[in-house]
C-alpha cells in the first residue's frame, strides 16, 4: 500500500517511517512527502531517499481552502491510500478530515488524552507526571482527539528539561510510528464510527 507523509519541519518521524518501510515484509511504501513550507528540512531528507517530495506553501494560496485543495491534490496524485501526519503544524478543515476518514493518522508527543496541543513536554514537567510518552491516533476533527491506535510510555527523569524529555520521547516516537502505521496497513486496527476497532477484539 502507498503512504503519503505530511510534514512542516525536521521530518525525523517521516525519516523513521521511510527507514522502517525498507524492511522486507513491511506492509507499505512511503511514496510522497508533502510539506507546507519550502524550507522544511525533511524535504531534502526525503529527496535523498529518492522519494517524491513537494512543498505546498500556504503563502502561495489566497485562503486556507485553496491551500488544502492543493495539498489534497498532491496526496491524490501520489496515489496514497494512507496519510501520515508527522509534525504537520496545521489544523485541518472538516472537509479535509472527512475525505481521509479512517485513512489519516497523526503522532502526538504525549500520552493522550493528556496534553493535547503544543509544548507537551514543558506542560508534562510542570504537571509533575512521572510518565510521559507518545500517541498515534486516527485524525478526527477534534485536534489530538481521535481514536488511539498505539502509545509508548517514557519515564520523566529528575532534572529533565523540556529538551531532554523531548529527545527521549522522540526516540520512542521513531519506534512507535512505524509500528502503528503497520497495524493500520495490515488491518489490525481500523476506525469505525468514532472508535478504533482492533482485529483481535469483538466490535
Ligand atoms: C514530533 O514530536 C511529533 O510528535 C510532533 O512534532 C514533532 C515533529 O518532529 N507532532 P519531526 O518533524 O518528526 O522530527
Image: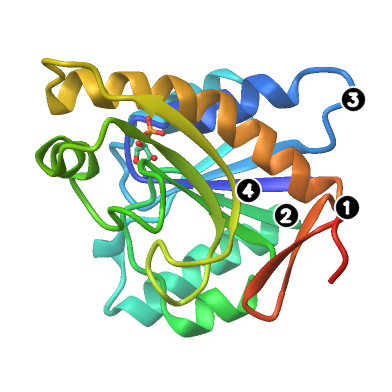
Residue located beneath label 3 in the image:
25
Residue located beneath label 1 in the image:
200
- Regarding mark 1 in the picture, which secondary structure is present there? loop
Q: Is residue 61 above or below residue 114?
A: below
How packed is label 1: few (under 14 Cα within 10 Å), some, or many (20 or more)? Answer: few
Name which of mark 3 and mark 1 comes first in the sequence: 3
Foreground: disc 2 or disc 3: 3
Name which of mark 3 and mark 4 comes first in the sequence: 4
Q: CA distance from mark 2 to mark 1?
A: 26 Å
Residue 90 percent location from the top left of the image? 32, 61
Residue located beneath label 2 in the image:
80
Q: Are marks 1 and 4 in contact (CB under 8 Å)?
A: no
Would you identify the image quadrant in which residue 155 lies?
top left
How packed is label 4: few (under 14 Cα within 10 Å), some, or many (20 or more)? Answer: many
Residue located beneath label 4 in the image:
4
- Regarding mark 3 in the picture, which secondary structure is present there? loop
Foreground: disc 3 or disc 4: 3
Would you identify the image quadrant in which residue 43 lies?
top left
Foreground: disc 1 or disc 4: 1
Q: Are marks 2 and 4 in contact (CB under 8 Å)?
A: yes
Q: Is residue 37 visible?
A: yes
Foreground: disc 3 or disc 1: 1
Q: CA distance from mark 2 to mark 4?
A: 6 Å
Q: Is residue 101 visible?
A: no
Between 189 and 159, the residue placed more toward the observer is 159
Q: CA distance from mark 2 to mark 3?
A: 19 Å
Can you tell me whether the CB of the residue at mark 3 lies under 8 Å from the nearest atom of ligand 1? no
Residue at 72% in and 54% down: 80
Name which of mark 2 and mark 4 comes first in the sequence: 4
Q: Are marks 2 and 3 in contact (CB under 8 Å)?
A: no
Q: CA distance from mark 3 to mark 4?
A: 19 Å
Amino acid at each position: 500500500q502507498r503512504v503519503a507523509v505530511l510534514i512542516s519541519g525536521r521530518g525525523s518521524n517521516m525519516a523513521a517511517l521511510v527507514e522502517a518501510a525498507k524492511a522486507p515484509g513491511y506492509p507499505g511504501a512511503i511514496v510522497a512527502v508533502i510539506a507546507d513550507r519550502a524550507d522544511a528540512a525533511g524535504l531534502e531528507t526525503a529527496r535523498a531517499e529518492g522519494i517524491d517530495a513537494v512543498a505546498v506553501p500556504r503563502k502561495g494560496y489566497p485562503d486556507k481552502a485553496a491551500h488544502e485543495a492543493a495539498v489534497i491534490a498532491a496526496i491524490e496524485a501520489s496515489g496514497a491510500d494512507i496519510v501520515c501526519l508527522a509534525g504537520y503544524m496545521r489544523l485541518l478543515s472538516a472537509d479535509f478530515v472527512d475525505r481521509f476518514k479512517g485513512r489519516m493518522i497523526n503522532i502526538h508527543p504525549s500520552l493522550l488524552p493528556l496534553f493535547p496541543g503544543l509544548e507537551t513536554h514543558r506542560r508534562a514537567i510542570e504537571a509533575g507526571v512521572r510518565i510521559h510518552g507518545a500517541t498515534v491516533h486516527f485524525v478526527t476533527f477534534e485536534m489530538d482527539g481521535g481514536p488511539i491506535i498505539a502509545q509508548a510510555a517514557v519515564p520523566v527523569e529528575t532534572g529533565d528539561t523540556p529538551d531532554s524529555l523531548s529527545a527521549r520521547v522522540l526516540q520512542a516516537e521513531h519506534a512507535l510510528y512505524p509500528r502503528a502505521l503497520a497495524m493500520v496497513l495490515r488491518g489490525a486496527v481500523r476506525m469505525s464510527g468514532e472508535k478504533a476497532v482492533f482485529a483481535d477484539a469483538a466490535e
